[in-house]
Image (cartoon, grey):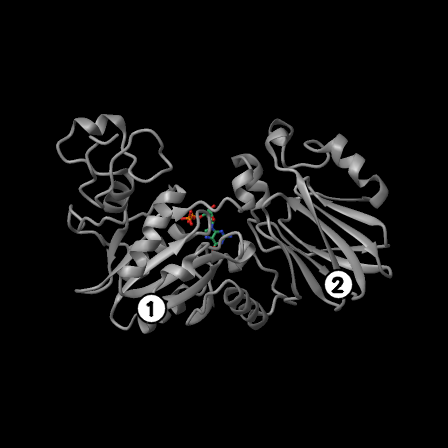
């Protein structure tokens, strides 16, 4: 690979093997004198950013590079996967740069979710993870809601400096930047030159004004993302497409709910109560007795309890049990990347089972 040429756009080393990774160009392009990677090609010709991902080593290299720059860092997270879409270690690398946290996919939240509670929760979580964002905003890159406000905030907080947009794969970073490009330029050609200034960070540059730019960094794969463990067809089913419709279950102690075969919720101890499930509307939910739950999972993973589909069930990570004693009424049990279950009454003992590596946590209800 070492004698491979570099892209005339972003300076990344060209590779012809993996379309999803940085530097991809079709093999035929190697015959040309000036080679442009697919990402730069699409941006140049269609004003469209294409998601690309990176390996862990490259990720560290990019983070290191960010600390040496002077600008505003805009970190995009997925509201449904706040922890799964976190960039581990980001706080150590940002240096003195301000961070603006933009939580995407707000269109999926039920209307009953209180915006302020959501923002407060994200602020607290960010703090726990060592980050002190200058502000937290929610947007729907898909629908465009909140994007003008986010652009205003970016303009305000960048204080005339460059902007670096970072995020894990799948959080909607490309959709967001594509919106920004459209709103800032009204569809016209943003990239007017054929050569973008080469950088060593594999970043794509989008001009903001005469002097400053917005830089897109490649998406980083976070191995804790639930999405990472699923194949495309199954993935479509877990990613909510429309506003989530809460589903309510009245449970007695010693009853269990399965969310497809992806997660399991045991109500172990406590008075009969209602539990509100907030996951993609297409995901089937099965109720059973706690005593039967192990056997049911064993026998029916991949058919009745799907996704994962039968084809991929053997590759799916085992479920790990997390037990909680929930004191307060209206507490959410959050399964990163999947959704959450609201416990309406306090004083309950529950167990949440999630695929290995996927985080489960409690938070005060957002509703
Ligand atoms: P990237 O890997 O972070 O660049 O993510 P993409 O922009 O490719 O988006 C990842 C997935 O999330 C795609 O399926 C998008 O359609 C979806 N997506 C992006 N933004 C939104 C949003 O605001 N709402 C919803 N519901 N889906 C979104």
Q: Residue shown at 53%/46% (left/top)?
A: 225
Rendering coords of residue 55 (x, y %): 39, 41
- Tally the marks: 2
The residue carrying mark 1 is 96
Rendering coords of residue 197 (x, y %): 17, 51
* Vertical placement of residue 106 versus 22, above or below: below
* Vertical placement of residue 82 versus 320, above or below: below
Q: Is mark 1 within 8 Å of ligand 1?
A: no
Q: Give the SS element for disc 2.
A: strand
Q: Quadrant of residue 166?
A: bottom left
* Vertical placement of residue 30 versus 37, above or below: above
Query: Would residue 309 be found to the left or right of residue 64 on screen?
Result: right
Query: Would residue 278 be found to the left or right of residue 9 on screen?
Result: right
The residue carrying mark 2 is 326
Spot the residue most to the left.
33
Q: Nearer the viewer, residue 192 or 264?
A: 264
């Amino acid at each position: 690979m070492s004698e491979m040429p570099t892209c005339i756009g972003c300076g990344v080393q060209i590779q012809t093997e993996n379309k999803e990774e940085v530097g991809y160009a079709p093999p035929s392009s190697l015959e040309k004198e000036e080679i442009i990677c697919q990402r730069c090609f699409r941006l140049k010709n269609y004003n469209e950013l294409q998601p690309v991902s990176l390996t862990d080593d490259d990720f560290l290299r990019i983070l290191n590079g960010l600390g040496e720059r002077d600008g505003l860092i805009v970190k995009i997270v997925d509201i449904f996967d706040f922890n799964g879409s976190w960039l581990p270690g980001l706080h150590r690398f940002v240096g003195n740069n301000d961070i603006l946290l933009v939580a995407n996919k707000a269109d999926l939240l039920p209307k009953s979710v209180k915006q302020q509670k959501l923002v407060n929760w994200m602020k607290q979580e960010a703090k726990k993870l060592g980050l002190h964002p200058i502000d937290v905003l929610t947007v729907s890159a898909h629908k465009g809601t909140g994007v003008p406000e986010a652009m205003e905030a970016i303009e305000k907080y960048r204080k005339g400096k460059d902007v670096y947009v970072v995020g894990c794969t799948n959080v909607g970073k490309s959709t967001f930047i594509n919106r920004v490009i459209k709103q800032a330029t009204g569809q016209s050609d943003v990239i007017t030159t054929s050569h973008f200034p080469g950088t060593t960070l594999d970043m794509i540059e989008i001009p903001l004004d005469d002097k400053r730019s917005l830089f897109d960094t490649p998406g980083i794969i976070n191995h804790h993302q639930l999405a990472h463990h699923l194949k495309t067809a199954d993935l479509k089913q877990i990613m909510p497409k429309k506003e989530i419709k809460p589903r309510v279950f009245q449970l007695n102690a010693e009853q269990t709910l399965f969310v497809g075969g992806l997660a399991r919720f045991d109500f172990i101890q406590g008075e009969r109560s209602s539990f509100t499930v907030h996951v993609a509307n297409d995901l089937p939910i099965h109720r059973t007795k706690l005593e039967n739950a192990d056997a049911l999972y064993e026998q029916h993973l991949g058919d009745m309890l799907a996704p994962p589909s039968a084809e991929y069930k053997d590759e799916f990570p085992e479920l790990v049990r997390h037990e909680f004693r929930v004191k307060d009424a209206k507490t959410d049990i959050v399964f990163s990347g999947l959704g959450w279950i609201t416990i309406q009454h306090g004083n309950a003992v529950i167990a949440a089972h999630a695929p290995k590596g996927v985080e489960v946590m409690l938070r005060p209800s957002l509703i």
